[in-house]
Image (spheres, rainbow, N blue to C red):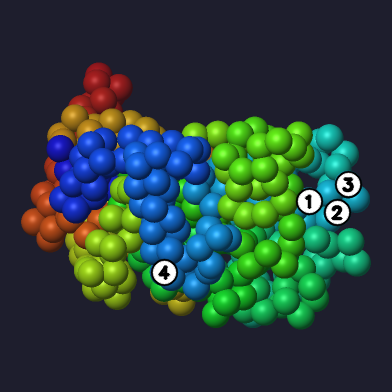
Amino acid sequence: MINFDNAATTWPKPVSVRNAVSDAMVLYGGNAGRGGHELTRRTSEMVYSVRETAAEFFGAKPENTILCLNCTHALNTAIQGILEKGDHVIISSLEHNSVYRPVAALVKEGVITCTIAEVSDDDEKTIENIRSAVRPETKAVICTMASNVTGQILPVRRIGQLCREKGICLIADGAQVCGVLPVSLEKDNISVLCTAGHKGLYGITGTGLLMTDCKFPIKPLMYGGTGSASAHPDQPDFLPDRLESGTQNIIGAASVGAGIDFVKKKGIKNIFDHENRLCNLFIRSIKDIPGVTVYRKKNLSYVPIVSFNIEGVSSEEAAEYLGRKGFCLRAGLHCAPLAHKSNNTPEGTVRFAPSVFNSDREVMVLVDTVKKYVRNLKNSKKVLNLFAEM
């Protein structure tokens, strides 16, 4: 089984991550922040160490680094925790449903209003589209740092600069960027960064991060036990406790810390260069196959994701066939109908997303399989046409 669906979840995981998970099962059996005994103390120290690792990696502070279940959890915490009655929000036309749906729900409930700003092929136009959508009551701009459908990179640093000039909160979805490109709250002008722990950071599933510069207070999405201020009915007013109710994913936290260490040791640039080279090899090798359409434009920058379609079959049919041949690729709308509408692929695409563990050989075996599939489709069509003429 060769995994080219790493934009959903990276697999396989590094040996160091697998070892961290194994060690956590043995060493960190306490409930972090709950109690003063040795097991809890040891576990609490490990969790704080992970916060420090993540904070240093993304230019945040450990106490403002929140452990979440996934990027969707982080985005919902930020969106529902910052926006209030009467606020206006701007989202991009490439957003994942983890942004689109919570925003749409708040709009439907009459809490906020929303403008969808079109992402252009020209960064200047994208910035202008967002600028022209700003109103006096605009509270936040929410945008993905790179599309999970095509991989197109958005000018987030410049969007953030615009937001800071106007006193607007920028909530950035870094799910497809973190671990592949350098990201910094301060340098990229991000107010709240949300990301997955299980994608480019190579942690296990059920992990995510939210990091904030604290300029825009976030109301809790959940209320409950935090191990602090337990005598009071009110949720603590300090981070990270305010946004972390209930028992944490201790094993997941250990995996994320080990995953970030792996990325640092490997080098972000080396990871990007390797994955990007595999994408370019894939594109060069399939672009001339009759009936194959690759959704990329020469004047844009991309993270290592390639969307394509094969004429005459749906993306689901193509991915199912490739799956039977041993390849994992995602098909359909990728939980991002806005992006597919913008990309003019309303029926979806097949998505190729390599990781640092994939090889040139694996890419070329996939390319050969696509070629055979297209040839078989063509031959089948000829046979059908022949029967139709009889």
Separation of residues labelled 3 and 1 (CA atoms)? 7 Å
Q: What element carries label 1?
A: loop
Asked if the residue at tag 1 contacts the one at tag 2, i.e. Cβ–Cβ closer than 8 Å, the answer is yes
Which residue in the protein does label 3 denote? 85
Q: Is mark 2 on a helix, strand or loop?
A: loop
- Other-residue count near label 3 (Cα within 10 Å), few / some / many at <14 / 14–19 / ≥20: few
- Relative side of 308 to 233, left or right: left
Front residue of 109 and 39:
39
State the mark number for residue 83: 1
Question: If you read the primary sequence from the N terminus, does the residue marked by circle 1 or circle 4 appear first?
Answer: 4
Amino acid, disc 2: Asp
Front residue of 349 and 195:
195
Across and down, in percent, residue 342 comes to 59, 54
Separation of residues labelled 2 and 1 (CA atoms)? 6 Å
Which residue in the protein does label 2 denote? 87
Amino acid, disc 1: Leu
Which residue in the protein does label 4 denote? 57
- Observer-side mark, 2 or 4, equals 4
Asked if the residue at tag 3 contacts the one at tag 2, i.e. Cβ–Cβ closer than 8 Å, the answer is yes
Across and down, in percent, residue 199 comes to 36, 51
- Look at the image and tell me whether residue 348 can be seen: no
Q: Is mark 3 on a helix, strand or loop?
A: loop
The structure residue drawn at horizontal position 65% and vertical position 74%, both measured from the top left corner, is 160
